[in-house]
Amino acid sequence: MDDETDWQHYRSFLAVLEEGSLSAAARSLGLAQPTLGRHVQLLEAALGTTLFTRSPTGLAATDAAKALRPFVESMRASAQAIDRHAHASRDTVAGTVRLGVSEVIGIEVMPAILASFRQACPGVVVELVLSDRNQDLLQRDADVAVRMVAPVQEALLARRIGAIELGLYAHPSYLERRGEPRQVSDLASYDLVGFDEALPYIRRMSAGMPPWHRDMFALRSNSNVVQLAAVRAGFGIGFCQVPLAIREPVLARVLPSVSLPLECWVVMHGDLRSQPACKALFDALVEGLLSYLA
Amino acid sequence: MDDETDWQHYRSFLAVLEEGSLSAAARSLGLAQPTLGRHVQLLEAALGTTLFTRSPTGLAATDAAKALRPFVESMRASAQAIDRHAHASRDTVAGTVRLGVSEVIGIEVMPAILASFRQACPGVVVELVLSDRNQDLLQRDADVAVRMVAPVQEALLARRIGAIELGLYAHPSYLERRGEPRQVSDLASYDLVGFDEALPYIRRMSAGMPPWHRDMFALRSNSNVVQLAAVRAGFGIGFCQVPLAIREPVLARVLPSVSLPLECWVVMHGDLRSQPACKALFDALVEGLLSYLA
DNA sequence: CGTCATCCATACATTTTTGTATAGCCAGTC
DNA sequence: GACTGGCTATACAAAAATGTATGGATGACG
């Protein structure tokens, strides 16, 4: 334990990894290129591994370096979290909070909630990150998050909001053009906008619905926002959160019997309970999302 | 992004936090005491926060410093993971792997599995950590783990082993002395060895069993191993994993109708799929635990 | 009440790290 | 084929960090 690597070298290593060359990394960190070269050299000596193959066009990361990348990124996430929370004062509600939410929630639901939160807590700067990986919270990429799965980590402070209902929607002009489907089996002849099967909560949610196949979609996107925009533009039929459709009634519901529940949780790292700014945002999110659901 | 804190200062900060004084931290890191003093000073300047109140008896951490501690610990966990995995070669099955398991599994089940794993992969050094927090995996305190809850993190690679049955057991000498209980309600008059309610999977597991209260236990311990040892020593009646009792038949089952299922999963960080040593241990655990259950 | 051990802060010499400048190498491009 | 712009590696001076030594202050202990 007495001869560990200089943590600063990890930082330089990550910069080189991201920038692809010593020179670029040096610029990004505000250091000199030989310094970065030495850092990498020392790190390689300390780890006993070759991290880059040098070439006059830049440095190419070896497999070993690529394998180590997530760990260094995790280090940086923690370091950034430290900077955020150090500036936050412990007595007044102020500081910077990183909020991770899914795309649709972030774009459609958050703005209103954050606007009123801003008025209530003008001292808090919110960094909104569109991402849906629960991992972020534990890696400290985000402080507070809105998630679609129940967290099992004990370290996380979680509050269940309820189930957001998902329904099928289309633009009235599309239905006028194509007529309305009468039953689920009719959907095959319509233009369906597809969700991304990769997301695990969607896999779970649609577990009981055999008829959905990737092939039947006329438009697929890994972005739920793109899907929503397509439906709104009259492309075809797709899923939309029911509360969203009610709030802005530009879409017409199709086959109301089709309904998927989407669990919704507000989650925060337990460590942050004592950070007034995080706690305040957490509470504001719970309140805002509850009223969104109602 | 150009004026970030020197990561090395975080390392010094953590050492001071843990050791309680600059001098002790300096000894622990192999540095001089003034160096640590400067590091802390620079970090305080960079963060704009007072981290310690100086006194001739040592440094006392402020609330701000305490709040930042988990973040720095997370950084160190990542740094240590880097060191571990850098030494691991990518082609041969060798290196160091940290394995996190619960107490009982670690003490009663792992030795046999690890012994045969050792023969199969002599190049792999296993660090066995007794801990049950899933968080460890994401914080990279552990590379592979055996867990009692289904992981929901997408970043984790998980393999379900099955349900370990828990039953009530007692030493034959105890039953001889006190007679055997006939029904669950009889238990109140026996000496019960209690499990720790704090563990969430136990809360979940015993959700359907109202009669268990903390007060009825004659001996409670947050260590499941202590409970098991007490039961084996003839203290009274307590829970034991059925496969364990079968393997070493020193205990007699009581009220066989009482049975709790304990889910068992082998979990690994997805990043480590390409690390031969981690993968090999993962596979060995799956195989070993499956045969433990059978 | 003095002794001793422990702690932090400071001053100064030394070592280490860093930056500047330069040379050399490769890939486009005119 | 020379030119330009990107890169790394090396040499050397400047700057920064470190270690040593010392002073002062506190608490434990006989």
Image (cartoon, coloured by chain):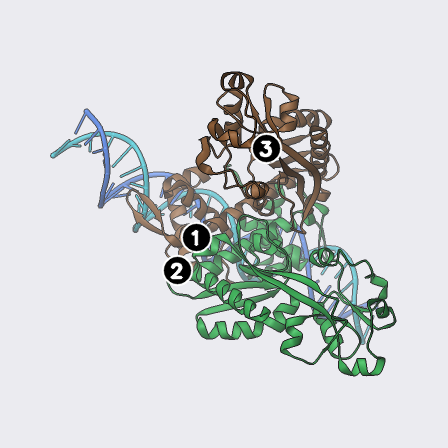
Chain colours: A brown, B green, C blue, D cyan
Taking the view exactly as shown, the residue that stands out farthest to the right is B189
Work out how far the residue at label 3 is from the one at label 1, CA to CA, in angstroms: 28 Å
Instruction: Tell me the number on the disc at residue A128.
Output: 3
Give the quadrant of residue B208: bottom right
**Where residue B229 sits in the image (x, y, percent)?**
72, 75
**Where residue A160 sits in the image (x, y, percent)?**
70, 40
Q: Say left or right for A33 vs A279.
A: left
Instruction: Tell me the number on the disc at residue B90.
Output: 2
Instruction: Let me know if marks 2 and 1 both belong to one chain.
Output: no
**Where residue A47 sits in the image (x, y, percent)?**
43, 59
Q: Say left or right for A104 vs B54.
A: left
Host chain of mark 2: B
Per the image, label 3 sits on a secondary structure element best described as: strand
Q: Do the residues labelled 3 and 1 touch (CB within 8 Å)?
A: no
> Which of the two discs, 3 and 1, labels the residue nearer the N terminus?
1
The answer to whether B292 is drawn above or below residue A206 in the figure is below
Give the quadrant of residue A272: top right
Q: Say left or right for A140 vs B234.
A: left
Q: Mark 1 points at which residue?
A: A67
Q: What residue type is labelled 3?
A: Leu
Q: Which amino acid does label 1 sit on?
A: Ala
